[in-house]
Amino acid sequence: LKTEFLTRVSHELRTPLNSIKGSIYYMNKVLKPLSPEYGEFCTIISSETNKLIEISENLLDYLRLENGAQVMKKTMINLPALVQEIFDSKVLKTTLAKKGLKLNLNVNKDISNVLGDRLRVFQFFINLIEGLSHYLVADDKISITFDENDYVDIYITIPRQLPESIYQNICSSTYIFQGEHSEERLKLY
C-alpha cells in the first residue's frame, strides 16, 4: 500500500510540475521577461520546479530499487576503460577545466571485467567526480586507481579531506526527499 501510494503521489506531482516547467520556459523564451525582476522570478520558479521534479524522480527510483522492480541491463564492464571514457567526455572535461582540476587514472594490472549496469556505473562515476570537484580547488587532482586481489578494488584519492558535514548524509536514502540542500552535496545513495 505504501509503495502504491507513493508511486501515485509521485506521478500526480510530475504532471503539474512538468506543466509549470513548460509554462516558465514559454514565458522566458517566447514572451521575454519585461523586467530583470520578472526574469529573476522566472529563474527561481524554474529552479525550484526542477528540484521538485528531481525529488519526485528520486522517490520513484528509490521505490523501484526497494521493490526490486528497477530494470537493470547487466553486461560485462571493463571498469578502467569505462573510467577512461568518462575522463575523455567533453562535459566532464569542461566542468573540471572551469575549476582547474586534473584527473589521473592508474591501473596496477589487468583488471577483470565486472558484471553490472554500464549506464548506472557510468552515472555513478560522473556523479562522484562532479560531487568531489565541489570540495577541491584549482590544481587539485582526483586520482582513481584500480587494483585486483580477490576483488576489484577502486581507490579514489583527493589531496584534501572532505568536510565532516557531508558524511552524515552521504549514503542516506532519506536524503533524496530533501530538496533544500544544494546540488553540490556529495551523494552515494
Image: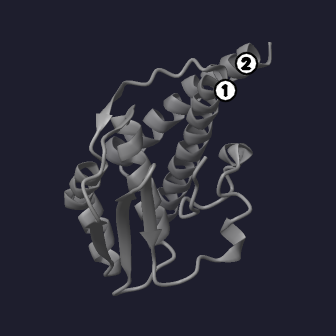
Amino acid type at mark 1: Glu
Whether residue 173 is visible? yes
Asked whether the beta carbons under mark 1 and mark 2 sit within 8 Å of each other, the answer is yes
Whether residue 35 is visible? no
**Which residue occupies 58% across, 63% down?**
185
Q: Which residue is mark 2?
A: 3
* Number of numbered tags placed on the structure image: 2
**Which residue occupies 28% across, 67% down?**
105
The residue lying toward the viewer, choosing from 136 and 57, is: 136
The residue lying toward the viewer, choosing from 112 and 73, is: 112
Q: Which residue is mark 1?
A: 66
- Disc with the residue nearer the chain's start (1 vs 2): 2
Quote the CA–CA distance across marks 1 and 2. 9 Å
113 lies above or below 125 = above
Residue 90: x %, y % from top left: 20, 59
What crowding class fits label 1: few (fewer than 14 Cα within 10 Å), some (14-19), or many (20 or more)?
Answer: few
56 lies above or below 121 = above
Residue 31: x %, y % from top left: 36, 44
Amino acid type at mark 2: Thr
Residue 43: x %, y % from top left: 49, 55
135 lies above or below 72 = below
Left or right placement of residue 45 versus residue 138 in this view: right
Residue 52: x %, y % from top left: 61, 41
The residue lying toward the viewer, choosing from 43 and 188, is: 188
73 lies above or below 77 = above
User: Seen from this angle, which residue lies furthest front?
Assistant: 150
What crowding class fits label 2: few (fewer than 14 Cα within 10 Å), some (14-19), or many (20 or more)?
Answer: few
